[in-house]
Image: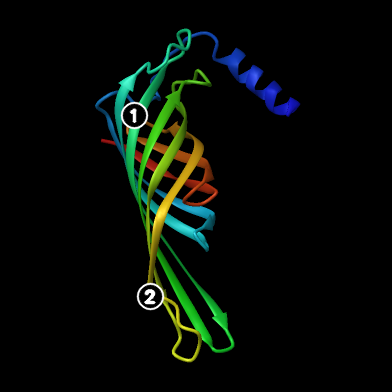
Amino acid sequence: MRKLSFLFIILFAIHAQAGDSGALIKPGEKLVGARIALGSVYGAGLGVVLSGEYGVRDNLFDLGGTANTLGVAASLGYSGYSQSYSWGTYSYTNILLITSGLWHVDLLNDPKIDTYASLSMGWNIGTVSSPSGGPQYSNTYSGLIWGTAVGARYHFSDKLSAVGELGFGMGVLRVGIDYRL
C-alpha cells in the first residue's frame, strides 16, 4: 500500500503543472480501434475487441489546471474456446456488446500519452456446442457483464496510437491500436 501511495504522490507531482493536453480525446472527436484481450476472457485465454470512442466533454472536473475529458465508447468482443473430455469436446463462443464511459486525465503531462480509466457494462451472448455422447447443456446462455480498466494510448502521429489496458471484463490485459477519424 505504501508503494502505491508513493507512486500516486510521484504521479501527482509530475502532472501538478498544467501542460499540453494534445493526446487527450477532444469533444466531438472519434476513435476506432482493435485490441487483443489476454487472460480470463470469459473462459478463453484470448479474445478480440473492436471499439469506437466519442469525446463528449472537456474538463469534467476541476483538477487545478490538469486537463481531463469524458468519452463514451461502444465495443464488440469475441472469444471462443473448447474443453475436451473422454466423451467428447464442448465448444464455447462469447459475443460481447459493451458500452463504456472513459475519463481521460493528463497524468503524465506528455503530449503523446493519453491516460484514462474506464467503467463498462454490456451483454454476453454465449453459445455451447455439446458432443452427442456426453451430458447436454443449453445451446445458448447470456447475461449482464461489467468491467473496469486503466489504460494509456501512445500517439505515434495525430491519427495512429498504440493502446494498453489493464483491468477486468474483456480480458485482464488488452493491447492494440486506435485510429483517430
Q: Around disc 2, counting alpha carbons within 10 Å, would you say few (fewer than 14), some (14 to 19), or many (20 or more)? A: few
Vertical relation: 109 (above or below) 25: above
Residue ID at (69%, 23%): 5
Q: Which residue is labeled 1 in the image?
A: 158
Residue ID at (55%, 80%): 84
Give the mark, 1 or 2, whose residue is nearer the N terminus: 2
Numbered tag placed on residue 109 in the rendering: none
Q: Around disc 1, counting alpha carbons within 10 Å, would you say few (fewer than 14), some (14 to 19), or many (20 or more)? A: few
Which amino acid lies under the numbered mark 2 shown in the image of this protein?
Asn
> In the current view of this chain or complex, which residue is farthest to the bottom?
133
Instruction: Please provide percent x and percent y for residue 116.
Output: 46, 30
Rendering quarter of residue 33: top left
Instruction: Please provide percent x and percent y for residue 60.
Output: 38, 18
Q: Quadrant of the N terminus?
A: top right
Instruction: Please provide percent x and percent y for residue 170.
Output: 47, 51
Q: Which of the colour schemes (rainbow, by chain, secondary structure, one colour) is used?
A: rainbow
Q: Which residue is labeled 2 in the image?
A: 139
Instruction: Please provide percent x and percent y for residue 75.
Output: 34, 47
- Tell which of 123 and 5 is nearer to you: 123
Q: Secondary structure at mark 2?
A: loop
Residue ID at (42%, 28%): 103
Q: How many marks?
A: 2
Q: Nearer the viewer, mark 1 or mark 2?
A: 2
- Tell which of 39 and 126 is nearer to you: 126
Residue ID at (37%, 39%): 100
Question: Do labels 1 and 2 touch, CB within 8 Å?
Answer: no
State left or right for residue 57 relative to residue 94: left
* Cα–Cα span, label 1 and label 2: 45 Å
Rendering quarter of residue 179: top left
Q: Quadrant of the C terminus?
A: top left
